[in-house]
Image (spheres, rainbow, N blue to C red):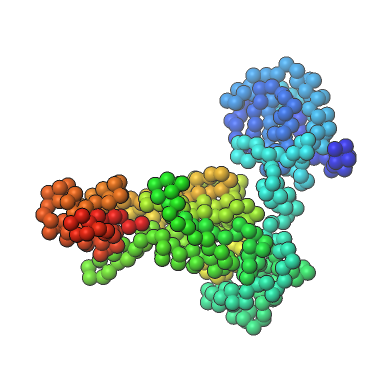
Amino acid sequence: MAVFFLSVLSKFIPLRCSFIAGHMTETQNIEYKQHWRDEYLKWICGFANAQGGKMFIGIDDNGEVVGIDDYQKLMEDIPNKAVNHLGLMIKKENKHFLEIDVPISSVPISYHGIYHYRSGATKQELKGVSLQNWLLKKVGKNWEDLPAPSAILLDLDENSIHKFLKKAIAQKRIPSEAMSEGATALLENLHLLTKEGQPTNAAVLLFGKKTSAISPTCSFKIGRFGKTDDDLHFQDIIDCNLISMPDEILSKLTDRYLLRPISYKGFERQEPLEYPESALREAILNAIIHKDYASTWIFLRVYGDKLELWNPGVLPEQLTIEKLKGRHSSYPRNPHIAEVFFKAGYIEAWGRGTTKMITECLASGLPEPQLEEDQGGIRVTFLKNTKTDLTNLGLNERQVKAVLIAKENGYITNRQYQKEFGVTDRTALRDLNELVERQLFYSTGATRDRRYHLKN
């Protein structure tokens, strides 16, 4: 510990400790404390490691000045403790109440060997993957920039690189001459090789033959659930390189997990997915591009009435959930991966993905997707407006209610249908068979006791 502080002493971070009068509102970069405690050195550490900030001693949480009696002693103690525990030097100016002005530190700061970080209005301890990513960022690196362990150019799939190149040229985002320049030149221009010519983590993720060699959690998990999270009906794992992953995921979703209910617009047959395909694609692309690949898997859970996509990786400090719903800039976690997807035409403009999802869902008569931060990641939930959705398919009121009954009870029978709606056996049979033809129901059992189940 003494050696650490001694090595930092030549790089003191100046802090300003002063007494000023006034009233302020607590914000992300401001912390109020009524009394000083030595544990508040953790908050100073967190400010220095993040975007800087100010701590006021002698002010309550409402921003009201309550005063401090021992300010003269604190003016001596706090600078000494900052030097001894954090390697930070404090300048002193005498005014009215204690203000500690913490600038951003250019070097990592720890308190008793633990790195603290200010995020939003809270302080967190950086550990494991979070600490690793933060330390890399502090020296101007991303995980995607690191050389992939033992990887060589032969570990990359030529067909995947060629597929990308054709798309990028067609989008006019890469000149056609690139087709004859070879894979090495292309990868260098995309910043996917180290100075020594070794493929980076991003290169293997994007085009690798075996991506799990560098990240065992880079695959994409999809599961079909019943009414509860412990009722898993079936699942799939999409295990391929990133440039192939969006198409593989959508293909699996449409083939196995989602319905295409049949409807007609005039004489034209309509078969849209349960959720707007363009909105799903945006959510999937966002998850792939912004994922923390040093963390866990992406999980896509499909239920009867909703679809949830959870992606590991917290929001950048510049964004909030509310800002995601409006016009905002893009801060990609993996800039080189994002650049490849942009050049291939998968994304048109960074920062439009979430707003496009919302627009597409509302235009389809569905509720606005829910966006939330949860468990160190971002969750997007697509919801169904079942009654409106079914009415838009051209179903009559009896059929709409029959679907809702089957959803609640698991099935409906011809006899139940007759009793519920006061119709004849023939009318009930015609209505129910139409629901089967539209692929909303499937039937089981003999004719007299046939049950009509909602198709998952």
Q: Position of residue 19 (x, y in %)?
A: 73, 25
Q: Position of residue 397 (x, y in %)?
A: 20, 52
Q: How many marks?
A: 0
Q: Position of residue 192 (x, y in %)?
A: 68, 67
Do we see residue 174 in this rendering?
Answer: no
Do we see residue 11 in this rendering?
Answer: yes
Q: Residue lying furthest front in this view?
A: 446
Query: In terms of image quadrants, where is residue 428?
Result: bottom left
Locate the N terminus and report the quarter of the image it occupies: top right
Residue at figure coordinates x 43%, y 59% from the top left: 279
Residue at figure coordinates x 27%, y 51% from the top left: 411
Q: Residue lying furthest top in this view?
A: 69
Q: Position of residue 118 (x, y in %)?
A: 66, 39
Locate the C terminus and report the quarter of the image it occupies: bottom left
Residue at figure coordinates x 65%, y 72% from the top left: 156
Residue at figure coordinates x 67%, y 61% from the top left: 214
Q: 331 above or below 244?
A: above
Query: In terms of image quadrants, where is residue 350?
Result: bottom right
Query: In terms of image quadrants, where is residue 395?
Result: bottom left
Q: Is residue 129 left or right of residue 421?
A: right
Q: 104 above or below 222?
A: above
Q: 214 above or below 70?
A: below
Q: Nearer the viewer, residue 439 or 14?
A: 439
